[in-house]
Image (cartoon, rainbow, N blue to C red):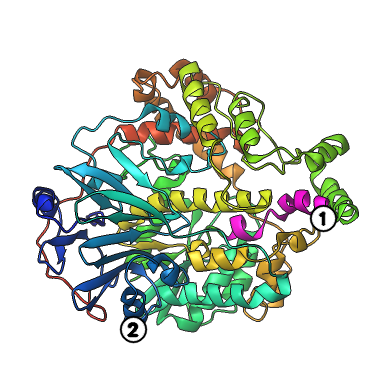
Amino acid sequence: MHAPPTWFAVLPDTDDAAPAARLLATAADRVVPHASGRPWIVGTWGPGEAALVLAGPSRIALIGRSTATSAVLETALAGGLDRIGERTRALTGCFHLVAAVGGRVWARGAASGVRRLFHADVRGVRVLADRIDALAASGAPVDPGVLALRLAVPPAAEGLEQEAPLRGVDPVPTDHAAVLEPDGALRLSRWWRAPRPVLSPEEGVPAVAEALEEAVRARTRAAGTVGCDLSGGWDSSTLSLLSARHAERLVTYRWDTSDPGNDDPVWAAKARAFLPDAVHRVAPADGLPLWFARVDAPSPSLDEPLPCIRIRERTLHAARDLASLGARLHMNGQGGDELFAGNALFLHALAARAPLTALKRAWGYRALARWPMAATARALADRRGYGRSLRRAANALDAPPVTQRTPHFDWVSPTRLPPWATPDARGAVAELLRAAADAAPSARPRAQHAKLQAVRTSGCAMRVVDQLYRHAGVELATPYLDDAVVNAVLSVDGRRLCDPYRYKPLLAEAMRGVLPDELLTRRTKGEFSGEAFTGLKYHRSALLALTEGMHLERLGLVDADALRAAVTGPHTGAGGLAAIEATLGVENWLRQSGRPRAGARRPETRIGEAT
């Protein structure tokens, strides 16, 4: 029995919104009113996920997880809506924030993209919602250009990852709030900007440590049994050890592996030894669905394509397993790599400030990654701007993939379309990239912008994975992608972290005293290509089934014959499967249907009450 998907919608304070409210309320089990009595927030959400503070006719709702108290929320509300973004920027946790003052409504999600907002015309008024399918008209057509973007590997970012694949629904950019005026008009207001990287690592370490602990505390606070990945890597081990300080009951979770070359089990066992009071669940490899299992079967109701469909069945298996152990919230380490690894990106900025130091460190990276000398020198000397980089990316969609042996310090990810993408698909993606070239970068220097884009791409992906978990009755949490954690990390000058011989130095220093020294000696990372190829071998027929009668082919985006040839052809590395997975993830989503299910309405609730 799957739990129904959670969702909510926000309505303007106007009589014209009554038809939209009636339509949305049929699928909701909760309705929270404006001070006027008109419906304000309608939807379905889980226990402990919402708090409401009233201050006279003004009100503010926090939907998600935070350590913010009612007093903090009331103070944020007291100054009105004009500067509420600034007053709430430092709140810890991951949540949507919705405020209503004087007939105006202000709402935002998370800058990281884990929690998002969309808007659409519903029965004649603009309505906000956290899910695309809560707003889309029945039978709404897809947007082929947005679907073409989803075929790219690595994913196209620069705000394009935020586009909604259904026509008639528009995204609210993650760094903007949506304002619904009393006349029903909608405008966007910037509430978040990347912090300037002005702190030394020594100055930034305390803030990073505090932000991570508060991010975990926001999940363990009154949550009962909490699950946490424990793969043996630094990211998951950190979260597990922090959770042990605060959780009423901690369940650690790891998928076992059949690959003897993967040393995750060794390091996970070391980490478990430091958590004697936790319940430790290691799911045996022979009881887990293989990668690509049932990839041709419909997914649970997701409002956009799942980016990791290869492990969909394994993810659902884990979520059900966690639910059986009493966990209703589970944390993973997604975002740890995006924030703390990849510091070679800062070589480019370091070369402009301290060229000799940059060359010395570049030599170390060259030795580790086998970068060619000439290519390294060209990449360090490149001073092209953001717009030119995007236009260059638009012209390189058919170029060979950039590998780890290629030094890359550019503004944008070297996104590529697979050979089975049609000329129409390539043209659509190129056009969208060129259009994005007119915007300003999200941060400076290049590496800061690239890290932020990686965070947002990860956050948008985890939003969909959370929908998958919720079908098993478990909420997924990604503390590294909390805005407060992102702010703390981006405030540190990355040039000082650019060291080929140190692994995640900022995380190591911030978690010294939490992560035992024994765990900090690990320099390896689990590798799963063996499981990828085993899954492909046993489930190739399911992959091929998705290539028959393809929706993507009818949309003119994919050559199905070329895709079948890739599925059945030889593969020399697991990286080549990423493009197949991206395409089949989109195709699987196109074959699903479903909207939030109706339920019994519940009364409004206030902070501190069970919700």
The secondary structure type at the circle numbered 2 is: helix
Q: Residue at x 61, y 23 (%)?
A: 398
Q: Nearer the viewer, residue 374 or 337?
A: 374
Label pair 2/1, CB-CB below 8 angstroms: no
Residue 243 painted magenta: no
Return the residue at label 1.
353
Left or right of 272 in this view: 10: left
Q: Position of residue 588 (x, y in %)?
A: 36, 34
Q: How many marks?
A: 2
- Of labels 2 and 1, earlier in sequence is 2
For disc 1, the neighbor class at 10 Å (few under 14, some 14 to 19, many from 20) is few
Return the residue at label 2.
71
**180, above or below 387, in the image:** below
Q: Is residue 368 in view?
A: yes
**Which amino acid, mark 1?**
Arg
Left or right of 150 in this view: 26: left
Q: Is residue 537 in view?
A: no
The secondary structure type at the circle numbered 1 is: helix
Q: Quadrant of the C terminus?
A: bottom left
